């Protein structure tokens, strides 16, 4: 079973300073470990995935169980629906989602396609809002879904906010694993593509992140011009060409971004 990926700071050990609460960090690692496997997990499974001692994991699980976030029978453990309150708290307090949702609903209705909003989290993008013309979401990208930043249109838009030197350092520090046969994994080419997309003001990714799927994205700026998110419209290649995406969807996305800018602080 794979272990959770830790940051460089984690690998170096406990951060300096007295304000770091190690027990809280360990509890969060235990919660995250449930994403490693798609089934109820044993104490040993969780200890291995979180890279923590069994005794520590057991105490954390008992605490989470008493708080209603974990259910178990001393052999197998699962998260309960109450864990979703953590995600809903983020969404309720997140200004980006609150401001963007009605604008995305309008764009989705006009485009007759799904419109999504993503933010950057390390080397990945996380989708934090979604709008469907029918308000019925098919299987696929959903809120909380993660994808590599380097090969997605939203990711390239968000990475484009970095300076050229920062971008080069970020891409060189990534492991570029192909998601499809079309995924560009040459780091120099990825960097050049992101810089080009930055100058165009949008990114169009064709078949790189998911087979049979293409998407177009624009940056979402706050009032002072800083890029804080990316919005995209995606569709299956059988339904729309790249040219149609630029002609039909790009104006809608740009209009939405312009409308959102003065509302985001």
Image: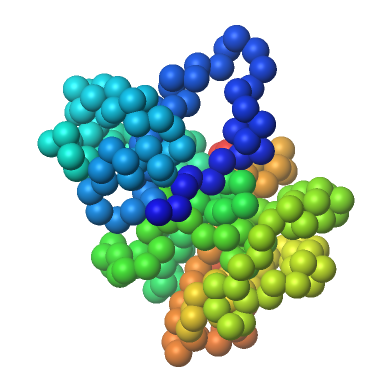
Q: Is residue 117 left or right of residue 139?
A: right
Q: Nearer the viewer, residue 56 or 232?
A: 56
Q: Is residue 21 left or right of residue 167?
A: left
Q: Among all residues in the image, which is located at the extreme top? A: 18
Height in image: 221 above or below 188?
above
Q: Nearer the viewer, residue 110 or 85?
A: 85
* Quadrant of residue 56 within the rendered picture: top left
Height in image: 170 above or below 43?
below
Q: Nearer the viewer, residue 107 or 24?
A: 24
* Residue located 50% across and 75% down the image: 210
On the question of residue 42 being in view, the answer is yes
Q: Is residue 175 left or right of residue 108?
A: right
Height in image: 166 above or below 217?
above
* Residue located 66% across and 65% down the image: 176
* Residue 126 point in image, percent of width and height: 50, 51
Q: Is residue 203 left or right of residue 88?
A: right
* Residue located 40% across and 42% down the image: 48
Q: Among all residues in the image, which is located at the extreme bottom? A: 238
* Residue located 68% across and 75% down the image: 184
* Residue 23 point in image, percent of width and height: 44, 19
* Residue 61 point in image, percent of width and height: 27, 29
**Quadrant including the C terminus:** top right
* Quadrant of residue 196 within the rendered picture: bottom right
* Quadrant of residue 206 within the rendered picture: bottom right
On the question of residue 109 being in view, the answer is no
């Amino acid at each position: 079973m794979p272990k959770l990926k830790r940051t460089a700071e984690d690998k170096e050990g406990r951060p300096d300073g007295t304000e770091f609460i190690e027990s809280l960090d360990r509890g969060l690692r235990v919660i995250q470990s449930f994403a490693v496997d798609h089934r109820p997990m044993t104490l040993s499974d969780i200890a291995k995935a979180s890279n923590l001692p069994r005794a520590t994991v057991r105490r954390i699980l008992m605490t989470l169980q008493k708080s209603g976030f974990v259910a178990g029978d001393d052999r197998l453990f699962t998260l309960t629906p109450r864990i979703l309150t953590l995600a809903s708290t983020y969404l309720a307090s997140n200004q980006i989602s609150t401001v963007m949702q009605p604008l995305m609903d309008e764009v989705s209705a006009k485009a007759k396609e799904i419109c999504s909003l993503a933010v950057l989290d390390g080397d990945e993008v996380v989708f934090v809002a979604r709008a469907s013309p029918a308000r019925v979401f098919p299987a696929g990208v959903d809120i909380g879904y993660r994808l590599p930043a380097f090969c997605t249109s939203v990711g390239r838009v968000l990475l484009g906010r970095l300076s050229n030197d920062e971008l080069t350092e970020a891409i060189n520090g990534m492991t570029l694993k192909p998601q499809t046969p079309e995924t560009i994994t040459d780091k120099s080419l990825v960097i050049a593509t992101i810089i080009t997309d930055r100058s165009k003001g949008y990114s169009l990714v064709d078949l790189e992140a998911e087979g049979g799927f293409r998407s177009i994205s624009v940056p979402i700026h706050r009032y002072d011009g800083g890029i804080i998110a990316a919005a995209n419209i995606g569709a299956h290649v059988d339904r729309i060409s790249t040219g149609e995406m630029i002609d039909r969807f790009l104006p809608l996305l740009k209009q939405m971004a312009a409308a959102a800018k003065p509302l985001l602080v």
